Image: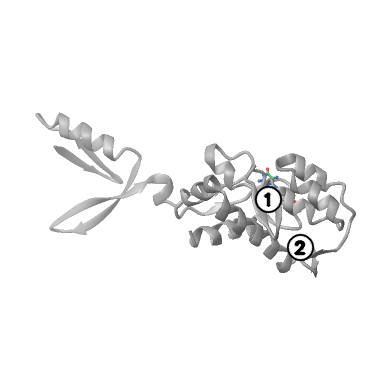
Amino acid sequence: MRFMLRKGLVILRPGDGDEAEWSDWIAAHAGQVFKLRGADRGAALHAMGNEAEACREPLNITSRSPGELRLISNFAHTPFVLDGMTYAGIEGFWQGLKFPDEADRQRLAGLYGSAARDAGYYAPRSEELHYGGKRVLIGTWDHWQLMKRACIAKFAQHDGARAALHATGKRPLVHHVKPDSRTIPGVIMAQIWMAIRARL
Ligand SMILES: Nc1nc(O)c(N)c(N[C@@H]2O[C@H](COP(=O)(O)O)[C@@H](O)[C@H]2O)n1
């Protein structure tokens, strides 16, 4: 094995007869980030894992997230039961809260994704809602706790969604959608997912 040092660069090359070891090592460490440890008498480059994980690159969770990540999003079809009601997904629960009548909440419970969000547009305008016999002001911490309870139920009951959340490791999650919600801003939504992930 040969190496050269340049400013901001360590160049490695296989030596004669090292080709097999070289290609194995390169394949095993493709895309990884290394940390330099050591000083005058020698140094080592330690693998810190793949770049996205090691650099804690944020993951944006929305209905357009790629692959299994989409299962984390509120728009996903991830059936769960909360307080005796079966929901097709989080969005049906969240938008259903905007309706005072039980029949409407039941109807929205059967919807998920953009169909659920669109159904919410027809809810009467109000500064408050009632759930479980309690009055909740819209857009407050109490309102967000309802979202958190629903998400806890979802991730406890839906194996795919839980696996997808767990697979995000320690990467920061964000929820950047335009326009941001006034009732549950993306930063609050992302905190809910990360708090649930921390307990998996
Ligand atoms: N998962 C997901 N993907 C998108 O692309 C979205 N725009 C949203 N938005 C969701 O909408 C809900 C908030 O709605 P209101 O502002 O209360 O009408 C909340 O579930 C967001 O995550 N979600």
x and y, in percent, of residue 75 in the image: 67, 44
Nearer to the camera, 56 or 120: 120
Residue closest to the far front: 84
In the rendered view, does 66 fall on the left or right side of 132?
left
User: Which residue matches tag 2?
Assistant: 139
User: Which residue matches tag 1?
Assistant: 90
Question: Is 194 rendered above or below residue 168?
Answer: below
In the rendered view, does 129 fall on the left or right side of 149?
right
Where, by quadrant of the figure, is residue 32 drawn?
Answer: top left
Nearer to the camera, 49 or 37: 49
Which amino acid type corresponds to the residue marked 1 in the rendered image?
Ile
- Quarter of the picture containing the N terminus is top left
Question: Is 37 rendered above or below residue 73?
Answer: below
Question: Is 173 rendered above or below residue 119?
Answer: below
In the rendered view, does 193 fall on the left or right side of 14?
right
**What count of labels does the image hold?**
2
Q: Determine if the C-beta at disc 1 is less than 8 A from ligand 1.
A: yes
Which amino acid type corresponds to the residue marked 2 in the rendered image?
Gly
- Residue visible at 58% across and 47% down in the picture: 72
Residue closest to the far right: 124
x and y, in percent, of residue 51 in the image: 39, 45
x and y, in percent, of residue 37 in the image: 24, 57
Neighbour tally class for label 1: few under 14, some 14-19, many 20 plus, Cα within 10 Å = many
- Residue visible at 39% across and 51% down in the picture: 54
Alpha carbon separation for disc pair 2 and 1: 17 Å
Nearer to the camera, 93 or 14: 93
x and y, in percent, of residue 122 in the image: 87, 47
